[in-house]
Image (cartoon, rainbow, N blue to C red):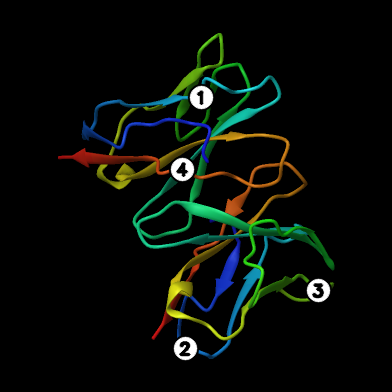
């Protein structure tokens, strides 16, 4: 079972910031938080990952709380093309990514 | 999808036939993961391979499914005697090195009639 909890769905107006929360209260010290998204039925797309510091790249920002029990993915200016299912994944020392059900983000005009 | 290639993109088989799905990882990558996504569900890990070695097959069904990643050529996921329950999207992913970020291919949609 996935080690993360995400809301089932969220809406965001185009041009506004989309803030997607994720709870991972059982995360251990050497586990990373990864975010992927899946647009319609395409292959999952890597967005960002982090251990304990906040991270930013050209796609998004990742804010991890100091206790590491939760995080937030921020899409600063959401567009219609950001409509997708977003997966928050805690990656342990094992090999595989454990995808849960994710958050279905709908960006509206 | 960062250069990970899968073919065919769509595959239709009748019950009892064999399905072969191919995955070519990014150039220089020698690791491949296979995942399966059943309708309306998240991706589930199946198998992890390096060139000529199966590292972890804990997610593979015990029967009818096999995977290989030969020294030359793509990784192949083989499903023998397909059943309707095998209908799904099959994705492969490729990291540069062990434990690094996995980049996914576009997937193969298998439909078993």
Q: In which quarter of the image is residue B25?
A: bottom right
Q: Looking at this view, is A17 or B83 the one in front?
A: B83
> Separation of disc 1 and disc 3 at Cα?
38 Å
* Residue B43 in the image, given as x and y percentages of width and height: 50, 53
Q: Is residue A39 left or right of residue A43?
A: left
> Separation of disc 2 and disc 3 at Cα?
28 Å
Marking on residue A24: 1
Judged from the image, the secondary structure of the residue bearing numbered disc 2 is loop
The numbered mark, 4 or 1, whose residue comes first in the sequence reads 1
Few, some or many C-alpha atoms within 10 Å of disc 3 (few <14, some 14-19, many ≥20)? Answer: some
* Residue B34 in the image, given as x and y percentages of width and height: 62, 61
> Separation of disc 1 and disc 2 at Cα?
41 Å
Marking on residue A100: 4
The numbered mark, 2 or 3, whose residue comes first in the sequence reads 2
Q: Is residue B43 left or right of residue B45?
A: left
Q: Which residue is drawn at 52% across and 17% down?
A: A69
Few, some or many C-alpha atoms within 10 Å of disc 2 (few <14, some 14-19, many ≥20)? Answer: some
**Subunit that carries the residue with mark 4:** A
Between marks 1 and 3 in the image, the one whose residue lies nearer the viewer: 1
- Above or below: residue B68 compared with residue B105: below
- Above or below: residue B55 compared with residue A73: below
Q: Is residue B72 left or right of residue A50?
A: right
Marking on residue B70: 3
């Amino acid at each position: 079972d996935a080690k993360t909890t995400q809301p089932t769905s969220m809406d965001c107006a185009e041009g506004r910031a989309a803030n997607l929360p994720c709870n991972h209260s059982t995360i251990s010290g050497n586990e990373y938080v990864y975010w992927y998204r899946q647009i319609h039925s395409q292959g999952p797309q890597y967005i960002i990952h982090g251990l304990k510091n906040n991270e930013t790249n050209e796609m998004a920002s990742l804010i991890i709380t100091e206790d590491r029990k939760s995080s937030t993915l921020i899409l600063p200016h959401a567009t219609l093309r950001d409509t997708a299912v977003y997966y928050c994944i805690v990656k342990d020392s094992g090999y595989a990514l454990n995808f849960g059900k994710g958050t279905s983000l709908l960006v509206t005009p | 999808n960062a250069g990970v290639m899968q073919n065919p993109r769509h595959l239709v088989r009748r019950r009892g036939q064999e399905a072969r799905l191919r995955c070519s990882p990014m150039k220089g990558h020698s690791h491949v993961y296979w995942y399966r996504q059943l309708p309306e569900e998240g991706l589930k890990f199946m198998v992890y391979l390096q060139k000529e070695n199966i590292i972890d097959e804990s997610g593979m069904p015990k029967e009818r499914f096999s995977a290989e990643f030969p020294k030359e050529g793509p990784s192949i996921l083989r499903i023998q005697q397909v059943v309707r329950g095998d209908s799904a999207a099959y994705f492969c992913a490729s990291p540069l090195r062990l434990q690094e970020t996995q980049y996914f291919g576009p997937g193969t949609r298998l439909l078993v009639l």
